[in-house]
Amino acid sequence: MRRLSKTSKIRNNISLHSKHGKSVEFLIKICDFIKSHKNTKEIVYPEYKESFDYVDSNFPHALIKEVKVYLCDHKLFFDIGIGRSLGFYSPISKIIVVAKQRTMKRKPIETLLESVEAKITLDEIIVHELLHYVSNSVVKGYVTREAEEEFAYGYSVRYLLDKGHSEKDIISNNFMPYLIGVVDKEKIKRKVIKMSKDKLGYDYDYFNGLTARKRKKDLKKVEKLLFKETIAEAKEIGKKIIKTYIDKKQIIEQQKENNDFDFMNLL
């Protein structure tokens, strides 16, 4: 019988726990496994100084420069079942883990939306994950994952603009995978089926009465339109996020000038 490597055991355990919920102890083991891996490196300030300084300047009470950040091979993210991710913050172990550039081939995609990937540099990933740290250590987390992610994406806007990225590029390259996840898929589906009534030969109510297999097959016929409408809606959500957080930043800067800066106005 072939012996399993430590990595394979981790992968098998991930599969098991994904069905039953990941225990605190197990999540700690994942972080310990990554930290102790021979190719993992700890990033210590002033490495990636601009990333740490940016978050620290916005959240001076969060002790950002003391946060432990680990850089690992992206293969480990595949091994623990988060191959599409580029980084994460563990509120249990209180560490940030970011991955080196992906070198492994992706699994074949089934839909056009699955082909969308972030085009983001390591310093930008670190900013994003440091903001997750702030959210959990200062704000004490958000009720929903969506709100948590909006906080991290939103407060990274000024950093990305200062690097010279346009708002359009930020939405398309940094935000798009997240934005696709928060788009109201049923709203888009309803819209596309209405637009494609002549092609499909039925309306949305009829579509809902079809078997899951038939619905999937028919949606393939209008996949390009679904993709186009989803991306368009995602871009609108992205514009609203950028406007919201740019406005917040302007208010904060004005307070600083007036010497009445209130840290909680950042939240």
Image: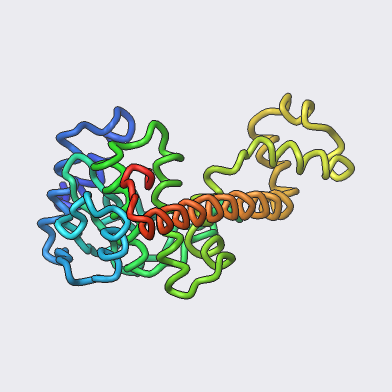
Where is residue 136 drawn, in percent x and y? 27, 41
Give above or below for 233 relative to 141. below
Residue 137 picture quarter: top left
Left or right placement of residue 90 versus residue 131 in this view: left
Q: Write the residue at 76% across / 40% down.
A: 191
Give above or below for 166 relative to 29. below
Give above or below for 127 relative to 165. above
Left or right placement of residue 131 versus residue 169 in this view: left
Of 225 and 132, the residue lying toward us: 132
Residue at the bottom extreme of this rendering:
164
The quarter in which the C terminus is drawn is: top left
Residue 158 picture quarter: bottom left
Q: Write the residue at 33% across / 46% down.
A: 262
Q: Is residue 78 visible?
A: no
Of 68 and 225, the residue lying toward us: 68
Give above or below for 38 relative to 183. below
